[in-house]
Each structure stands twice: as C-alpha cells, then as structure tokens.
Image (cartoon, helix red, strand yellow):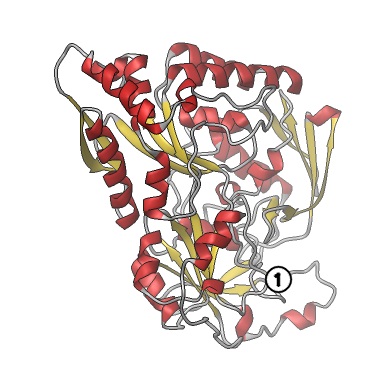
C-alpha cells in the first residue's frame, strides 16, 4: 500500500467535490462501451464495465474485490473442491422473461467451449461438466480441484450475457439515453428485494452514465468537475496527471496483482541463446525505469509476487545478487561475445506518454550494453513485447502461463503438467517445478507489477482499492443496488 499513498501525495490540486445529485458520471479509459460477446471479442475497460453492470455472472466482485452473490444467491463447495453447486435467485432478462437454469448452463458452456476466444477459457479446463440439477440449481463438476474458481466466475468475461436477444439480468439496465450518447445505466427491478414498490421510482443519483474515452479527455472531464470517476488508468497514461491540478485525495492507486514485463516473442537469432536473453534481462535498470514514470512504483525482478499456491518460494534470477553496474558489465560481455555482429531488438509497446518513458529507460539500458533498440506498435512484429496484465485470480500458474508467450519445451511442459495435477498438493509441487523452469528459460523479463489508478470524487463513498483493480458500478455510492 506504500505505493498508493506515495503516488497520490505526489499530486496536488483542488478536491473534486461534485454534489451528490444526478447520475454518477463515469469515464472509463478506452473505446465507447458496447455489449460484445467475450467468446469472440476481447473486451476493453468500458465494455467490461457495461457487461458487468448489465449481465452479472453467477457471482460478482464487491467494492473490495471480494466475492458476493450475483445471479446465484448462494453456493456450496463439496467433494473436496471437485463440485460447486449454485442456487439461482429469481431473475429476469432485459425483456422481462425469466432467467432459467438451462439458459445459464448453456451460456457458461458456450464461453468455455473449444474455439472460444474468451481469455479465461484456458484457465477453466478443469471444468468437466456443467449441469442443471433442478430449475433453480446448477452444478459445476471439476476433473481437478480449483479453489479459486469463484474469482474466475466473477469476471465480466463470464457474465451471463444472452446473445439473442442481447441482454443480461442486471444489476443495471440500459435506460433510454438518446442516439449517440453514452449509455445511461439504471438499477434493474429486483423481485428478490423486500419492498418491490420502492423500486418502481428510482432516484436520479442511482443512475450511472458510462463514457468510454481517451485518458486525456477523461482526466480533463474530471478536472472540470464534469465526472465523478475515471476508471482504468494504467502506466501508459499516468504522466498525464502531472499536466493538471487534481487533489491527492482524488487520485487512488490499486495494489494490483499481476504481470508487468517483457515477453520474449521470437527465439531465433540473438534471442535463441538463453545467455543472451539473460543479458537483456540483467541489463535493464528497473529502479530507474519505474522511478522515471512514477517515483514510488516498485520494480520487480521475478515472475511470481509471492508463494501463492506453489510449493516453493518464487524463483529469483542469479543476477539479482549483483549490483546494477556489475549486471551491466556482465551483459556487455555476453553481447560482445555474440559472433554474428550488431544486435537490434524490436520492442512492441502501447501508445501513451508512460510507454514513451518506459521505452526511453529500456532503450538507454540496452544501448549501454551494445544493443540497438527499436520501438514498434503493440501489434507489430517484434522480439520483445510488453505484458501488462492484472491477475484474474491468485494462482502462480496464471503468472507462469501468461508469462510463457513463447517459452522453451521444458518450461511449457512443466506449466502444462501443473494444469493437469490431480491434487492440490501435486499441483503445488508441479507449479514450483514450472517456476524453476521459467526462471532458467528466461522467456519473460519482469519489470514491475501493474500500475492501475483511478480518479474518484468524494461522493463515491464505497469505492475501494483492491488487488483486482476492479470497481463495479453498483458499488460506488453508499446506497447502491
């Protein structure tokens, strides 16, 4: 939490004290929000917020990033973690027709079926079967135990979104808002609440206007007191905050868990040799890099942030015992020994001033050891590509599998073996083996942990920082649905 306090107090300005009247206005950094099928389309922050708000899953995240009921009013885990049984509450689709257990099962099966592009599907292979037990109860049967399954079910990518006609069960509905305007979200009628008549007339301040826009516009809107929340900020746009005066109390930093570093995406030529990949990793001055972007942003030199569900402590590269000058000398010697002449490495990065500062620091470190860097677009051909991802759940295997964009056969086999482990104890042992294999392979170069920030007005009393860096729109004000 030290980074949260330090980064916030580095900014100064006037507090955003919008009155608690009218709709809560949220600027999410990204494209205009739209309802899209996660099976086919990668969702950005605005669209994830829209789906989370209108098509809740079996469970949801609360303001603190903990699990709370969604369409499932309660659940139990039995058979040593091999079976999750959910009891569904009464719910309606947007057209008023009731949600059925058969529909819920069909939606979940579709999202994890072969060919799905849902980013969570690779981490749900332990699901053996999803079945209807009664009209109100479904069961998720596992082939292997997964104690963090609920955290995956709470992600917007597993929201219960009906494709035809498109819609979900709430907790919001999209209200009439005019052509071309940002969606206006209004609390959905909940037949499970004790006083249904009290829901017939909603108050304007219970509504949420969800805007998707560039970071610069979102920051300017907040600074002008025309919005209550900016959500989805990252390292790429953090430097923009220095261009305006926003009070420290409005700048909030999440203690986000996840990966931030460079993945090896080509293993030919210079990067075919593990000693050369190691030279690149040890050459980068991580402290200078993070300080240049955000002075209190802590660097990282290992893939796993903690032991998590591994049987061993996180693996640490051998070069961490050296000073930065000693690392630079060692890297320069390895690169000078490369017999095939000058080395050029293309680095794929996103746009934004933070990414420009990041590249400047990486480039300076590489040039100092004899490598010529070249910045390319995030989706262009490259040797190194930035991974900036918040962990959807707390398993060491997620870190290793996500870092292994293009790792060696031994590391890949170890990661696959951890997935297939029949027991949690064996899974922990295999994860430790996979961590050691990834550390030896140097297929990923850790730099830090994800930097995630928001701008939060005083009226949003329920907003809380959390490790998922996720802030549901129904958990912002004190009296939300």
**As rendered, which of 424 and 141 lies closer to the eye?**
424
* Image coordinates for residue 104, horizontal then vertical, percent: 67, 47
Residue 294 occupies quadrant:
bottom left
**Which residue is located at x 74 percent, y 27 percent?**
145
Residue that sits furthest to the left in the current view? 341
Left or right placement of residue 302 versus residue 72 in this view: left
Determine the residue positioned at 27% across, 46% down. 360
Horizontal relation, residue 303 to residue 290: left or right: right
Inspect this view and state whether residue 116 appears: yes
Query: Is 369 placed above or below 156 here?
Result: above
> Which of the image's four quarters has the C terminus?
bottom right
Residue 35 appears in the picture as rendered: no
Spot occupied by residue 150 in the image (x, y as percentages of width and height): 71, 43
Which image quadrant is residue 344 in?
top left
Please say if 460 is above or below 70: below
**Residue 97 drawn at (x, y percent):** 67, 62
65 or 52: nearer the viewer: 65
- Please state, as top left, top right, bottom left or bottom right, where the N terminus lies in the image: bottom right
Q: Residue at x 46, y 76 (%)?
A: 246
Which quadrant would residue 29 be assigned to in this image? bottom left
Q: How many marks?
A: 1
Q: Position of residue 58 (x, y in %)?
A: 70, 50
426 with respect to 317 (left or right): right
The residue located at (31%, 56%) in the rendering is 352
- Front in this rendered view, residue 324 or 334: 324
Residue wearing tag 1: 481
């Amino acid at each position: 939490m030290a980074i949260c306090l330090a980064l916030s107090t580095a900014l100064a300005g006037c507090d955003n004290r919008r009155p608690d009247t009218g709709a809560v206005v949220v600027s999410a950094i990204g494209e205009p929000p739209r309802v899209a099928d996660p099976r086919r389309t990668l969702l950005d922050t605005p669209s994830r917020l829209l789906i989370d708000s209108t098509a809740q899953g079996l469970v949801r995240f609360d303001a603190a990033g903990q699990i709370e009921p969604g369409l499932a009013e309660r659940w139990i885990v039995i058979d040593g973690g091999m079976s999750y049984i959910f009891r569904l509450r009464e719910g309606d689709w947007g057209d008023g027709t009731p949600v059925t257990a058969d529909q819920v099962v069909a939606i979940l099966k579709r999202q994890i079926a072969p060919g799905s592009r849902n980013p969570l599907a690779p981490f749900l292979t332990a699901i053996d079967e999803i079945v209807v037990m009664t009209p109100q109860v479904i069961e998720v049967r596992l082939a292997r135990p997964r104690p963090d399954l609920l955290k995956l079910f709470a992600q917007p990518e597993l929201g219960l979104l009906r494709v035809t006609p498109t819609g979900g069960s709430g907790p919001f509905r999209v209200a009439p808002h005019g052509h071309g305007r940002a969606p206006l979200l209004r609390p959905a009628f909940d037949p499970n609440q004790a006083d249904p008549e009290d829901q017939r007339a909603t108050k304007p301040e219970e509504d949420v206007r969800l805007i998707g826009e560039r970071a610069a516009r979102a920051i300017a809107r907040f600074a002008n007191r025309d919005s209550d929340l900016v959500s989805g900020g990252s390292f790429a746009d953090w430097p923009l905050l220095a261009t305006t005066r926003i009070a420290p109390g409005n700048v909030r930093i999440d203690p986000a868990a996840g990966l931030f570093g460079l993945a090896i995406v080509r293993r030919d030529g210079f990067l075919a040799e593990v000693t050369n990949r190691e030279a690149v990793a040890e050459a980068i001055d991580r402290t200078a890099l993070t300080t240049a972007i955000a002075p209190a942003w802590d660097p990282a030199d290992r893939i796993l942030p903690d032991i998590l569900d591994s049987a061993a402590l996180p693996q640490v590269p051998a070069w961490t015992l050296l000073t930065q000058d000693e690392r630079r000398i060692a890297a320069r010697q390895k690169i000078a020994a490369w017999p095939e002449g000058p080395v050029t490495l293309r680095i794929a990065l996103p746009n934004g001033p933070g990414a420009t500062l990041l590249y400047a620091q990486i480039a300076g470190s590489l040039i100092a050891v004899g490598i010529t860097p070249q910045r390319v677009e995030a989706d262009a051909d490259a040797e190194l590509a930035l991974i900036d991802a918040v962990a959807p759940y707390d398993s060491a295997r997620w870190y290793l599998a996500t870092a292994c964009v293009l790792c060696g056969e031994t590391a890949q086999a170890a990661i696959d073996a951890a997935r297939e482990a029949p027991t949690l104890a064996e899974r922990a042992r295999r994860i430790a083996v996979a961590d050691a294999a990834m550390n030896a392979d140097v297929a990923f170069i850790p730099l830090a942990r994800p930097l995630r920030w928001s701008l939060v007005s005083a009226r949003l009393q329920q907003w809380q920082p959390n490790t998922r860096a996720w802030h549901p729109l129904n958990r912002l004000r004190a009296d939300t649905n």
